[in-house]
Image: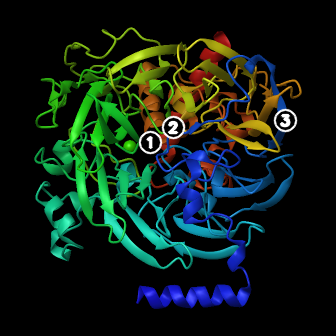
Amino acid sequence: MRTSFALASFGLSLLLGNVASAQVTDADLAAAASDNSQWLSYGRDQGETRYSPLRQINDGNISDLGVAWTFDTGSFRGLEATPLVANGIMYATRPWSSVFAVNARTGALIWDYDPQVDRAQGYRACCDVVNRGVALYDDKVYVGTIDGRLIALNAQTGAVEWEVLTVDRSRPYTITGAPRIADGKVIIGNGGAELGARGYITAYDAMTGEEEWRFWVVPGNPADGFENPDVEFAATTWDGNWWEVGGGGNAWDSMIYDEEERLVYVGTGNGSPWSHEIRSNGVGDNLYLSSIVALHVDTGRVAWYYQTTPGDNWDYTAVQPLMLADIAINGVLRKVIMQAPKNGFFYVLDRVTGDLIYADPYAELNWATGVDLETGRPIETPHARYDTSVTMIMPGPSGAHNWHPMSYNPNTGLVYIPTLQGSVFPYAIMDEFQFVPEAWNLGIKFGTLEGEPVTPEFEYVGSTGPATRSPGALLAWDPVTRRPRWYHDYDFTINGGTLSTGGNLVFQGGADGVFRAFAADDGELLFEADLGVGIMAAPMTYELDGTQYVSVLAGWGGSSGLFGPNYDGAYKPQGRLWTFQLSGTEIVPVEGQPLPDLTAIPFDESPARLAEGADKYIQNCGLCHGADGASGGAIADLRYASEATYDNFHSIVREGAYTALGMPNLSATVSASDLDTIKNWILSQRAALMAQ
Ligand code: CA
């Protein structure tokens, strides 16, 4: 069946005369590590190490870095993509899953494609309507869209070649991750665990879009039968009626193909709901949540799995970037897979067998004291499985490392990890849980926890002692000695993806909008440039006509609502694709719009009403518009709204006046009186801001 289909499509290619035009082949992908002129896939090479041997820009001349060209994206929300370069064309994505191609020498636009996703579905994206980039194969560009489609575009023209719907739209699935190419297939996962979904990844024929296989991360309802024995086995590790909410496990980011082993490794997501007690009666490991799973590329069947967080209870996804390397451990060259998942341990596994080699804390944490290298299981601390009293657990749901890509430098032997060192969260199980489709179903108490019983704070463990680090830090981790080599501490949380090069450099941007370069070996800060807009995405590099370029997308959003910055004195700077070279032009930051002057608006100051408003705000608004009402700048900061906007709250929130902008109609969850109390609380935050 498959053979005949491939022949048919080959015949079609002959008719169209485009057989010779394939710009990215399997051989190109296999040789990507040594191809300095291009950057062909999300993590550059097959191991996704994000290391380039280029050294024209190096630790001796980095101070001479300037602008080669820039491209304004026209977007004001989060930019998370790693741009790809093939045959002199750069491909990248922006919010709402749009794709653009520019001349990699000049930044001149070649084509721009908007998949026209339904903006009203944007609320399903837990962490902004972001996209982390495209995949390239043959003469096609592949993108996953926020509304669940996988689309193949013509690399030269941007015209749609095929399109498939990869999700059941009756469930809140979203796609933000970059597709990957594996043995002629294009692979894509999805997000949506918190809203109630069953995670999976799917492989499609890269030429035709025909589905080849699907790996279900968690089992469905046993009464419906199991898709295959892997799912049947997983079901023995679950209890209760998990399928009603969905179970979660959504694999929304990391997938990596090992051509030698013919394995696809996938990092899987957290449980849905978060609470293990509510999800599975507190029983079982809940496979394949929070795991690294190796799948046979021909069938999608499980070769091995390693669960980093058995019985996940904390939103500890293992979707964080995976990386393959061959490194000497105790004098023996091992083929390893490495990951720094949310739970705070850095894992080194044998990628052929799945055996755990090492697991060591790379950040402060208190949910476990270590990982037993014999059993491979974490040694949990007594209060880690919190009950209804508030328990401060580290890391929190944002993890000690999130999606921001790490890189590896074979010259230093170090892995450069953008870490979130200050992540702590008050966990407490909800007294009464009820599944609400399309809402956040966490099974934990949210909002104001004042007056709730509290479990005494317990000790932190970790590679660096008690929890004294700054909120974010670039960590250079040595996977052989199992220790940090150096840190660069930040006074903010989100520090972006990293790139390492043969010039003894590590490049990284941050929430403060500054693009930096460090000496890869000792961490010395060698270069800083203010780009004027927060940076989350990973930089990349390529060489054309003898010139080395470094590119990065700068655009603030994502989970920024919760993390700031607030761009004091300015807001909403436009996203920009920056490309640098030696002796380029002066780096001039993007300008934000000035903040409006505020006028006082009276509100009801009674504490009970304000507390209720705070709770309702957190439940319904906080994720996008920011905890405490302070937006990170990507989405409207409601404290700065005009009086006319406040007057229009009812039509905006309960009648969907702004659905085209991505603001959902919340009439099902926010009553008219809820809205009054939310508005009252926002006005109190406005007054507090004016009093500063
Ligand atoms: Ca999650």
Cβ atoms at labels 3 and 2 below 8 Å apart: no
Mark 3 C-beta to ligand 1 under 8 Å = no
The amino acid type of the residue labelled 1 equals: Pro
Work out whether residue 619 or residue 250 is closer to the camera in this orientation and state it. 250
Split into 4 quadrants, where in the image is the C terminus?
top right
Q: Residue at x 83, y 31 (%)?
A: 67
Q: Earlier in the sequence, mark 2 or mark 1?
A: 1
Q: Residue at x 52, y 19 (%)?
A: 605
Residue 664 visible at all: no
Which amino acid type is shown beneath numbered disc 3?
Ala
Horizontally, residue 441 falls left or right of residue 48, namely left
x and y percentages locating residue 542 in the rendered image = 70, 42
Q: Nearer the viewer, mark 3 or mark 1?
A: 3
Along the viewing direction, whichever of 506 and 474 lies nearer the viewer: 506
Q: Quadrant of residue 339?
A: top left
What residue does disc 3 label?
68
Residue 556 location (% of width, % of height): 65, 35
Specify the amino acid type for callout 2: Pro
Instruction: State the SS at label 1.
Output: loop
- Tell me which image quadrant ligand 1 sits in: top left
- Where 158 sits versus 334, above or below? below
**Which residue is labeled 2 in the image?**
405
* Residue visible at 49% across and 54% down in the picture: 124
Q: Is mark 1 within 8 Å of ligand 1?
A: no
Residue linked to disc 1 = 321
How far across and how far down the image is residue 552, in percent? Answer: 69, 37
Question: How far is the residue under mark 3 from the one under mark 1?
Answer: 29 Å
Instruction: Tell me the CA gap for discs 2 and 1.
Output: 6 Å
Categorize mark 1 by other alpha carbons within 10 Å: few (<14), some (14-19), many (20+): many
- Could you tell whether 592 is left or right of 634 in the image? right
